Amino acid sequence: MENAKQPLDEETLFSVTQIFKALSDPTRVQILNLLQDREYSVNEIARTLAFNQTTVSHQLRFLKNLRLVKSRREGTTIYYMQDDNHVLELLTQAIRHVHHH
């Protein structure tokens, strides 16, 4: 058993489960999917996905805390963009898997 996997340390385990928690919410999946192409303001995200602005802001805060999205301010507008290609690749693979079956 030379190649046996070692148990994950607590910090890694927590971080991995948080990422899957982020991907388990349909609203967050929609937001992450949208942000694959370009940056959007909170208002643009809300309008494009037909969500209210409060919901979008709350979900973006959750995603930002996990470093899955990042933001920049331009005047009074905050723009969000994806911040982790690894998780977006995971999301893309999940979407491909669904379309394949």
Image: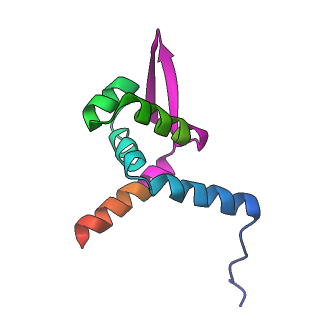
Q: Residue 7: x percent and y percent?
A: 72, 74
Q: Residue 32: x percent and y percent?
A: 40, 44
Residue 34, by quadrant, is: top left
Question: In the image, what residue occupies the spot 27% across and 36% down?
Answer: 50
Which part of the image, by quadrant, shows the C terminus? bottom left
* Side of 71 where 14 appears, left or right: right
- The answer to which of 48 and 69 lies nearer the viewer is 48
Question: In the image, what residue occupies the spot 24% across and 65% down?
Answer: 99
Q: Is residue 29 above or below residue 9?
A: above
Does the stretch in magenta take in 95?
no
Residue 18, by quadrant, is: bottom right
- The answer to which of 98 and 86 lies nearer the viewer is 98
Question: In the image, what residue occupies the spot 51% across and 27% down?
Answer: 71
The stretch in magenta equals 64-89
Q: Residue 12: x percent and y percent?
A: 69, 60
Does the stretch in magenta take in 75?
yes
* Side of 25 where 13 appears, left or right: right
Q: Is residue 4 above or below residue 50?
A: below
Q: How many marks?
A: 0
Task: Kindly tell me whether residue 58 is visible in this rendering.
Answer: yes
Q: Residue 16: x percent and y percent?
A: 60, 59
